[in-house]
Amino acid sequence: MISNLVTKILYPYRANNGWGRCCLHEKRVFLAVEHILVLLLVVLIKNLFKNRKLMKKVVLSLGVLLGSLYGPAYAQQTADWKYVQGKIVTPWAEKVVAANPLPEYPRPQMTRPNWQNINGLWNYAIVPQSAGDTKPSVFDGKILVPFAVESALSGVGKTVGKDSILWYQRLIDFAPKLKDQRVLIHFGAVDWKAEVFVNGKPAGSHQGGYDPFSFDITDLLAKKKQQEIVVKVWDPSSDGPQPRGKQIKNPHGIWYTPVTGIWQTVWLETVATSHITSVTPVADIDKQTLTVNTAVASAGAADKVKITAWDGVNKVAEQEVAPNQPATLNISDAKLWSPDAPNLYNLTVTLTRNGKPVDEVKSYAAMRKIGVQVDENGIQRMTLNNKFLFQYGPLDQGWWPDGLYTAPTDEALKFDILKTKEMGFNMIRKHVKVEPARWYRYCDELGMLVWQDMPSGDLGNNWEMRPGITGNETDKKRTPESENIYKTEWKAIMDANRFFPSIVVWVPFNEAWGQFKTAEITNWTMQYDPSRLVNSASGGNFEPVGHIIDLHNYPAPVMPRPDLFGQKQIIVLGEFGGLGLPVDQHVWQQKDNWGYQSFKNQEELYNRYATFIDRFEPLIKKGLSAAVYTQTTDVEVETNGLMTYDRKVIKFPETKLKQIHSKLYDPSFVKLSGK
């Protein structure tokens, strides 16, 4: 009986992961392993338990566990997929499981147990835009979702462009049980315009390459187990006005390969008809309160929302409010969040009706404050938790040689943050790109401050990089459509990511790329999220708005004169450095690589960098509040990274970096007024 039960549990993993494509030898090996596992389970369980009901539960649990352990590994060997050859790849490329890529829960800020990951091999076709809206009758082949079609890990490695349409199609096994429930399909990000169809019927459309979106597909599901999902994507890349960051149709210099289509996890979620749609905590460390804003869909008149805050296993606060109303929790003797002590409080948010739970999500929050204070010389300073902390970190592009916008695995996604921390940085400037939610969760956990850029687009205006100079700079004359695209996506990006306490600065514009209506955009951003600072124009064009004036200078560190600019705005050095070192066998191409200043070996590179760090102490004392070094990794032909593009070579001695960086955080450098 036990043997039959275990075999029934394990059989679906064989059936769903390419059993029919296996050779006879592979099947024999698989069956032999399975039989050995069954025998071991039988012996173990018979010796441990006499209670047959308990024994059955244990067998079920172990069967599922074993299936999850070796099912995906077996699928990786048998799936009809391999990454595109010809370019360097990261160490994690070999760990990508085609049957189950990026299987981790994609929304760590609001978790539920009932979800299904539908990443994996989909059918794809690239057709002329003139072909119309009809789904192709024949597809070109398989694409590994969620890797962009241009990437090596997609298994395709083709460009699309403004004159073509990218189609995706997949049949999934999903048997809906819909009594008082709804089924949502979620997309972490699709670049750029996506139309979604379920069983041949439209589910919805979305524009924007950097924000998550979802559709309620309950009424489109078939009663049978199998459902068809189709996605139509159009992305004009650099031929359109939409935000695109560093993507360009002809990559060169600081501009990289286009990214088209699905590039973050696709997943299904089953929720109650009345359910929680968002949780947004806002801390006030001065009042020792945490305000939690919870949005609820289809709430009943008598429904309640209960928010409970936990410090480990200890309940620290709880409040019950009406749906869609803020709850203010008193957090006395709060453990503050900082890079040195990234304390997080767990939250449980429960929707109740007549005292019974209807929906519940797990979340978290941090007690931290980013602010502005004047020092003893009257210079504006950036503060964390009412104390001056010099913020120093790399410019982080977030690109991968094998996945482009998408890290190969969750381990890879976390790797760059860990290395940045180990090198002694306390901040990352996420440059004209937005990351998956799990990246920000890791920054929250590890204690990494984040400056979040708006991805740029619709370029073409003049740039003046010198503060206090006018006559050269121009605004981009955008069309009404272009303005609306920017404003809509900027709000969506903020809505999706304002949850994460690690984000402390919003950056609407960089180096005048598509910059327009600076005062309007900056003031709106400050009003929409008063809990963070706003760096209106990193590197120019400068206007007297926002909290920060941000100079770019290569290669050496300098700063705007504090006596001219420091009394009204925080002074930061938003980009400097860019020291280049191409490492043979670890470059995107063998020739024509570049950095702002190139070196022959690691010793020369480090020595030059160390002289830059020595220049910071007097700058900090005079008025500098933060600096950003270019950059975390090499990217395509840029070889000015702290690491190579494939992450296989760390160009700097990490221990030495941490040692020389630590002196930048000396609290004695700055005395705040009244302290």
Image (cartoon, rainbow, N blue to C red):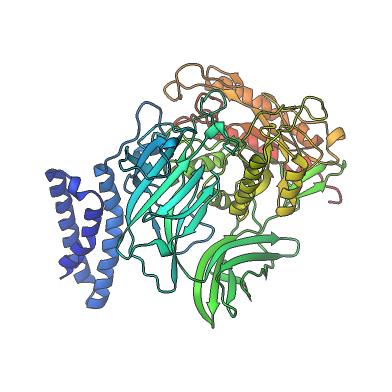
Across and down, in percent, residue 224 comes to 29, 63
| Depth order, front residue of 91/159 | 159
Across and down, in percent, residue 78 comes to 24, 43
The residue drawn where x is 81% and y is 45% is 671
Quarter-wise, where is residue 143 in the image?
A: top left
The residue drawn where x is 67% and y is 63% is 334
| Vertical placement of residue 243 versus 460, above or below | below
Whether residue 168 is visible, yes or no, is yes
* Residue furthest out toward the bottom: 354
Quarter-wise, where is residue 599 in the image?
A: top right
Whether residue 385 is visible, yes or no, is no
Across and down, in percent, residue 215 comes to 48, 58
| Vertical placement of residue 521 versus 157, above or below | below
| Depth order, front residue of 431/187 | 187
The residue drawn where x is 54% and y is 82% is 355
Tell whether 85 sits left or right of 314: left
Tell whether 449 sits left or right of 285: left
Quarter-wise, where is residue 56 in the image?
A: bottom left
Across and down, in percent, residue 640 comes to 56, 26
Quarter of the image for the N terminus: give it.
Answer: bottom left
Number of marks drawn: 0
| Depth order, front residue of 189/104 | 189
The residue drawn where x is 35% and y is 36% is 155
